[in-house]
Image (cartoon, coloured by chain):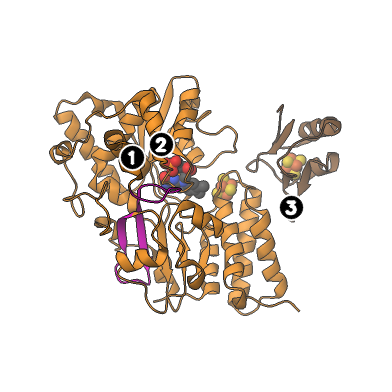
Amino acid sequence: MKAAVDATKCNAYGTCADHCPSVFQLDEWGYGSVVGDGTVAEAEIGAAKVAAADCPEKAITLIDA
Amino acid sequence: MTPASVLAGPHAEGADSARRAAVHPAIAPRLVVAGSEEARLHLAAERALGTYEPGTEGGEFLDELERSGLTGRGGAAFPAHIKWRGVVAGEGPRVVVANGEEGEPASGKDRWLLTHRPHLVLDGLLLAARTVRAGRAVVYLSHPETVAAVRGALDELAAAGDDRAREVEIHVVDPTYVAGEESALCRSVNGGPALPTAKPPRPHESGVDGRPTLVSNVETLAHAAWLARNGADAFRAQGTAASPGTALVTLSGACGAPGVYEVPLGRTIRQLFDEVGGGLAEESHGFLVGGWFGGVLRRERAQDTPCCYDALRTLGSGLGCGAITALGADDTPVRVAADLAAWYARESAGQCGVCVNGTKAIRDTFARIADGAGSADDRDKLVRWGDTLPGRGACAFLNGAATLARSAVAQYPEAFPAGA
Ligand SMILES: Cc1cc2nc3c(=O)[nH]c(=O)nc-3n(C[C@H](O)[C@H](O)[C@H](O)COP(=O)(O)O)c2cc1C
Ligand code: SF4
Ligand code: SF4
């Protein structure tokens, strides 16, 4: 599974990095991005799904790779 | 010369670099053919050159495109055959768009091409439409003189009873830098604002009308039309093995003869200025390469680099749309970087928080250093942003600002505050 953050939607709420820090990181302005190429490790899929569902801007997409 | 005059570029009011073009002495021209240098080639003259005559077609043409090594001339230098095949692989109906927006301030070559050889661009667009079996063909423009030239060419075709004129639409957009970006283009043609969208999907997956869409720079299409009639071997007779063919370049700034030139790929930056650009001013200390998108390059490090897509990429820059500006004595590296950074902050489409904040931070940091109030921490921040911001925005615009930050410090370290 791969995660992506739509930079046009992200509004720097930061909940993604709280839910799933192995996949999402925040920059110095608080905007989210994926770590590396966004690959989600098997064990992190649940946390990544929570992060996507909880993103207030629905800026996160998860694609089965 | 003041920094403002170098950064004014070919699009500055009164600049006329796109009015005429010339040819490098070592080549037989493909685009800047005799008679077209300063005047529009009309239909009869184009037909005499073979324009609109069929060449290789269909799958055979795609093989020829692959053998030719033609890469996109709009900025990204992506192999044309991969992009065209990617569109063919999608389900029909498909769409083709000729990108003639040329929002890049240092570039005038697409305007020259559209106002002097509009029929060759249309020929290439129609070839692309047949090859990918498109149901719509659009020319995407912003400069009024290009709109008039393409309309005129379509009218000529129609007056000659050629039905193909009716197959082509013109879409006019307000000129901004990001309007030429491929997803902004699709959004504009679809009736929305000319602002980029997040990827995926890319236009070849879902673009105009949600259909697989081939977005191609107008110069790329003109080369494709030439290729269909002349073949890949002839195409590769100029240029280098890695960057075959010729390209239109726009030379500007501290040189003897700024303007648009058709040149073989692979000459060094210095050779280009010596052989067609009227020579580099002695005091010129560096370049902006790839328009304002490839950062700054120091003269002694860059002038002997071949103008080939790979070689410039190795320098952390890129030939991009082929615009090269020679910096003058007054264009101190930090001042130029500060002015360019201010332009980036202004031209950001304002959609992505990271782009709005990143371009502003880069602008403010360069301004502080230019005012003599910068610190080593400021320099380190520029380096960090240069490394971390590429790829973060919905479009590659932010990558240009990051390249500026990274390259200015790397190329002119002595111009930045040193560490404690
Ligand atoms: C900010 C931005 C602006 C761009 N502006 C233009 C432009 O004005 N004209 C153009 O042909 N390509 C422009 N591009 C590149 C297009 O997105 C696209 O890659 C190109 O039109 C594809 O054509 P090609 O493959 O023939 O080069 C721009 C890209 C970015 C990121
Ligand atoms: S939760 Fe959503 S809006 Fe908040 S930082 Fe993450 S991606 Fe951006
Ligand atoms: S990266 Fe910048 S220019 Fe590109 S879409 Fe986002 S805000 Fe607009």
**Any part of residue B135 in sight:** no
Instruction: Measuring from the top left, give residue B233's x and y in whole percent.
Output: 33, 40
Residue picked out by circle 1? B233
* B301 is within the stretch colored magenta: no
**Highlighted range, magenta:** B238-263
Residue ID at (28%, 45%): B114
Query: Chain B: what color?
Result: orange
Residue ID at (65%, 56%): B357
Secondary structure beneath dot 2 equals helix
Secondary structure beneath dot 3 equals loop
Q: Would you call the spot at circle 3 few (<14 residues within 10 Å), some (14-19), or many (20 or more)?
A: few
From the viewer's side, name the closer residue of B6 and B309.
B309
Query: Chain A: what color?
Result: brown
- State whether discs 2 and 1 lie on one chain: yes
For this view, does B32 lie left or right of residue B159? right
Q: Would you call the spot at circle 1 few (<14 residues within 10 Å), some (14-19), or many (20 or more)?
A: few
Residue picked out by circle 3? A27
Residue picked out by circle 2? B67
Q: Would you call the spot at circle 2 few (<14 residues within 10 Å), some (14-19), or many (20 or more)?
A: some
Instruction: Measuring from the top left, give residue B385's x and y in whole percent.
Output: 67, 59
From the viewer's side, name the closer residue of B87 and B93.
B87
In which quadrant of the rendered image does the C terminus of chain B lie?
bottom right
Please say if the residues under marks 1 and 3 sit with CB atoms less than 8 Å apart. Answer: no
Picture layout, residue B153 above or below residue B132: below
